[in-house]
Image: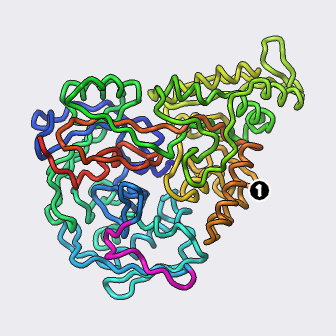
Amino acid sequence: MTVRRIRTAAATAALLTGVAACSAPGDSEVGGGGDSVVIGVASEPDTLSPLLGYGKDGNSKVFDGLLARGADLTLRPALAKTLPEITDNGLTYTYTLRDGVTFSDGEPLTSADVVFTYETILDAKTNNTSRSELDAIKRVRADGDDKVVFTLKYPYAPFAGRTVLPVVPEHIAKGQDPNTGSLNTEPVGTGPYVLAAWSKGEKLTFKANPGYWGGAPKVKKVTMAVIKDDDVRATRLRSGDLDGAVLPPNLAATFKSDGAKKTYQAKTYDFRAVTLPEGNKITADRAIRRALDAAVDRRGMVDTILDGAGRPAYGPLPVDAPWFAKGIEREQDLGEAQRILDDAGWKAGDSGIRVKNGRRASFTLLYPSGDKVRQDHALAYASDAKKAGIEVKVESATWEVIEPRMKDDAVLAGFGSNGDPDYGLYTLLHSSLAGDGFNNMARYRDPVVDKALDTGRRSADTATRKAAYDELQRELVKNPGYTFLTHIHHVYVLADRWGDGLTTQVEPHEHGFASGPWWNLETWQPEK
């Protein structure tokens, strides 16, 4: 899921449900216009600096990476002229920069900017909790002003996809502390938009970059209104105060009869799961973990909580992903859950809650305040667990309260990275990242899973990697450090005045800010 997370823009949107409810955008913004758009999102970033993780998976409106992803997630050139030249058996990647690209302050992009960006992120003094994603890099160097050469420690098959990471200007960032410098709130990039204003807790306003190398955007002004409450966001959209918004499925469904708006549903790698921390003697018990996995009604959650806008999650990868291990699908089986607990010595107590060696099968499950979808998942999970004799005490809290408690208490969390399985699974499961902020939140440790993750990361052979990730997913069924519940679709509603060509991508957990049908907003052609 992803996570403190330095709190990147994407990351904050991923785990948090937002900050303060937004005051209305100015009157000139209401209803947008032919060349402006107002979008309602659930949360705002803490930083706009790629050095701390902002935009690391692409789609930043202020910055560009060497590469970008199209609608189908296929890699395409961005700041680089072409896809990289790969030599030395996959250990060397050479990128040639596009001619004539400038930052929004007019300074030219050079290879030194790229080198500075990657070296700063890899520096342990930089508070970027996604650093492990670039572990394969041994060295990055400039070859003249227009070429960048990456040398890897080992063949890392999905490396090109890591170079969607945004590039920052060395001439501005070099003299700053990357953790506290002005780049965090006053970004300067090569992207299609420039930050014009940021009212914390309310809105971020962007204006088109007239010197954008891809051509000046037709949509000249973009306002991201930060509106924590789902119902308020829907009301503001209905009143015309917003042009579009990300909404839960049940609220999006209320716009079906509105002919002036379109609904877009994006498939995702985004899943909801319950962390089962190793530090808690109940949730660390393998019999308890397996019983919870058997007791949960995943299909019921999809049908009732998500209104069908999702899929059961049998592990961290969605069932239609190419890396999904076929055959691990499983239905609710309360009889199996009870047998597992019986065999492990968990006996039914007077209250119906099982007991072993004087200890009750009881633990606390936290979920972030204000997140109705997670609340409903948590309550359904607790209801299913009780049928097997396990007490789950559901409690809401802010992330500031949850974070210090998540080493001992279960959390209804969200994770998921699209594309290559290494992108999401390593930070979710590898024991080396146990307790590293929101990485490996459950502090999960399993040598079989670690070996599979290391094999998948360090092998260039597709068959070898597929076998490793299959083994990993099967081991998670035997020893689930998380109870995987659902993969959710992201639902967006947008005013119908930009034609029929808008698309969504297959999205990661992070969404809302630079995802949805506005992922490529710089290419929109207003029609109405």
Q: Position of residue 403 (x, y in %)?
A: 56, 40
Q: Which residues are magenta?
A: 76-89
Image position, residue 496 (x, y; %): 20, 36
Residue 317: image location, x then y, percent: 58, 47
Observer-nearest of 180 and 251: 251
Choose between 119 and 96: the one closer to the eye: 96
Amino acid found under the numbered disc labelled 1: Pro
Specify how the rendered protein is coloured: rainbow
Residues 498 and 28: in front is 498
Q: Residues within 10 Å of mark 1 (few under 14, many from 20)?
A: few
Question: Does the stretch in magenta take in 77?
Answer: yes
Q: What residue sits right under mark 1 in the picture?
A: 447
Q: Is 290 in the magenta?
A: no
- Name the quadrant containing residue 297: top right
Determine the residue positioned at 19% across, 67% down.
Answer: 105
The C terminus lies in quadrant = top left
Question: Residue shown at 52%/25% (left/top)?
Answer: 303
274 sits left or right of 81 in the view:
right
The one nearer the camera, 376 or 17, is 376
